[in-house]
């Protein structure tokens, strides 16, 4: 199993280019199941989650080619049943449900797994499919969704923690081929939902309102092929920005979309970090002394839960008391115990983490528990004195393309080591 060995204490300096967004590409790859025609997707990051999605589409009967950063899919014939173990491995695989139901009126998928961050139910996905007239059965770990006719309807998709990103994606995709009009209320507004809607529209779907809480989809008879380039990964861009600030370096981030990053950039500014924007280029460094701050994770356009763990590292190196409140996933604090191994002083009070920042971090062996927690441990290792070994980095490879190579390009002393 691979680990990352980091010799910390070196400020990050230089330029890094952002890859395509994992959370945009997974539903867009699933959307290719909605047509028999060829779909070409560009700027696809080479990630293990993308490999999984490739295998899932293949197991459903599609032909998929992954060449450089281009994925070409042709789904002439599609089966409604996905490979149980493949789907179980990745939470994002739930988004094949909508396209299968749209195209075949039938989907049989295993209950998805993924990062262990809370219970992550799929009740809203099922409510979405029921809203189009489908019936749901659960048997032997499989969810069976069937509809004789798929009919548009009004569906309220707000849950306990607000809207659901992939639930919105699923409903939008199934509704493109339903009869009549579907109105999604309390839809997720994330840029990845907007990118999916844009791609679907290019395939011939009729979608209005993506990016707002009300999305209206008018069903069409069929969709056709598409060429689409996915948006840059705002979470990766935020991770490098925080890395620059936490190590007291200066990093130029190219190919980012600052217009997708308002909440993060605003909080970085509160924290004493200077971000210069020039089109799609961000230059990030400390603007003087770092300042303690408070952050609450919220649905878009609020502060993303996927940047919470990384932000905690910046707070840990900032003298004073900072607070993070997690409102999306209740158990998303697994990184706290690991950051403590490096000397960070963090306590958990209900949904909040209180960070007593400013203590010197020193390297230690740590264990990655989920994707973004892993990124936080890498940032903490870079900021700490001495050597940090981050174990179980397969989580990191799910969501960050060539992170070790990109960090080496910024001067970090980081090596991938294989431990048998
Ligand atoms: C997506 C992202 C993930 C991000 C999350 C929140 C992808 C591949 N993953 O995950 O990186 O952390 O959005 O921004 O795009 N919920 C329910 N019932 C459901 C579905 C969700 O209660 O049926 C709850 C979840 O437990 C959570 C909240 O809704 O509390 C938001 O989850 P959701 O937006 O669905 O996350 P994902 O789409 O799975």
Image (cartoon, helix red, strand yellow):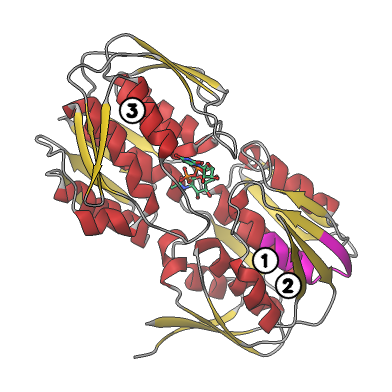
Disc number for residue 243: 1
Residue depicted at x 50% and y 23%: 210
Residue depicted at x 82% and y 50%: 269
Are dots 3 and 1 in contact, CB under 8 Å? no
Query: Gap between marks 3 and 1, in whole Å?
Result: 41 Å
Q: Quadrant of the C terminus?
A: bottom left
Residue 250 seen: no
Q: Position of residue 279 (x, y in %)?
A: 65, 40
Image side of residue 263 versus residue 99, left or right:
right
Query: Gap between marks 3 and 2, in whole Å?
Result: 47 Å
Residue depicted at x 28% and y 30%: 226
Which residues make up the magenta segment?
A: 310-322
Residue 48 picture quarter: bottom left
Image mark count: 3
- Judged from the image, the secondary structure of the residue bearing numbered disc 1 is helix
In this view, the mark in front (3 or 2) = 3
Q: Nearest the camera: 181 or 47?
A: 181
Q: Is residue 70 above or below residue 40?
A: below
- Judged from the image, the secondary structure of the residue bearing numbered disc 3 is helix
Q: Which residue has dot 3 on it? A: 129
Q: Position of residue 363 (x, y in %)?
A: 66, 87
Q: Please tell me how crowded label 2 is: few (under 14), some (14-19), or many (20+) other residues with Cα within 10 Å.
A: many
Q: Is mark 2 within 8 Å of ligand 1?
A: no
Are dots 1 and 2 in contact, CB under 8 Å? yes
Q: Which residue has dot 2 on it? A: 247
């Amino acid at each position: 199993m691979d680990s990352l060995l980091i010799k910390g204490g070196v400020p990050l300096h230089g330029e890094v280019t952002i890859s395509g967004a994992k959370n945009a590409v997974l539903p867009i790859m699933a959307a290719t199941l909605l047509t028999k025609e060829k779909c070409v997707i560009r700027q696809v990051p080479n990630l293990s989650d993308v490999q999984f999605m490739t295998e899932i589409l293949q197991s459903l009967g599609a032909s998929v080619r992954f060449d450089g950063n281009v994925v070409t899919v042709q789904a002439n014939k599609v089966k409604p049943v996905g490979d149980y173990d493949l789907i179980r491995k990745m939470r994002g695989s739930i988004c094949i449900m909508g396209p299968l139901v749209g195209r075949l009126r039938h989907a049989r998928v295993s209950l998805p797994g993924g990062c262990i961050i809370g219970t992550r139910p799929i009740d809203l996905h099922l409510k979405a499919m029921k809203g189009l007239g489908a019936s749901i059965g659960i048997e032997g770990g499989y969810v069976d969704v069937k509809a004789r006719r798929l009919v548009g309807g009004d569906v309220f998709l707000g849950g306990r923690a607000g809207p659901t990103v992939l639930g919105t994606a699923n409903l939008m995709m199934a509704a493109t081929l339903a009869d009549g009009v579907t109105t999604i209320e309390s839809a997720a507004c994330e840029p990845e939902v907007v990118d999916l809607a844009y791609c679907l529209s290019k395939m011939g779907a009729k979608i209005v309102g993506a990016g707002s809480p009300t999305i209206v989809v008018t069903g069409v008879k069929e969709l056709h092929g598409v060429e689409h380039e996915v948006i840059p990964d705002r979470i990766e861009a935020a991770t490098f920005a925080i890395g620059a600030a936490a190590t007291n370096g200066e990093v130029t981030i190219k190919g980012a979309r600052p217009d997708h990053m308002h909440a993060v950039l605003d909080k970085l500014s509160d924290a004493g970090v200077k971000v210069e924007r020039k089109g799609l280029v961000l230059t990030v460094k400390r603007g003087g002394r770092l300042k303690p701050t408070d952050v609450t994770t919220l649905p878009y356009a609020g502060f993303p839960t996927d940047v919470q763990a990384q932000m905690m590292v910046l707070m840990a190196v900032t003298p004073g008391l900072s607070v993070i409140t997690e409102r999306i996933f209740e158990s998303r604090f697994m990184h706290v115990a690991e950051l403590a191994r490096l000397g960070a002083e963090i306590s958990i009070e209900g949904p909040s983490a209180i960070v007593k920042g400013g203590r010197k971090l020193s390297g230690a062996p740590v264990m990655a528990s989920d994707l973004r927690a892993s990124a936080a441990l890498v940032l903490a290792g870079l900021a700490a004195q001495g050597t940090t070994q981050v174990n179980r980095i397969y989580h990191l490879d799910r969501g960050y393309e060539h992170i070790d190579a990109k960090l080496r390009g910024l001067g970090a002393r980081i090596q991938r080591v294989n431990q048998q």
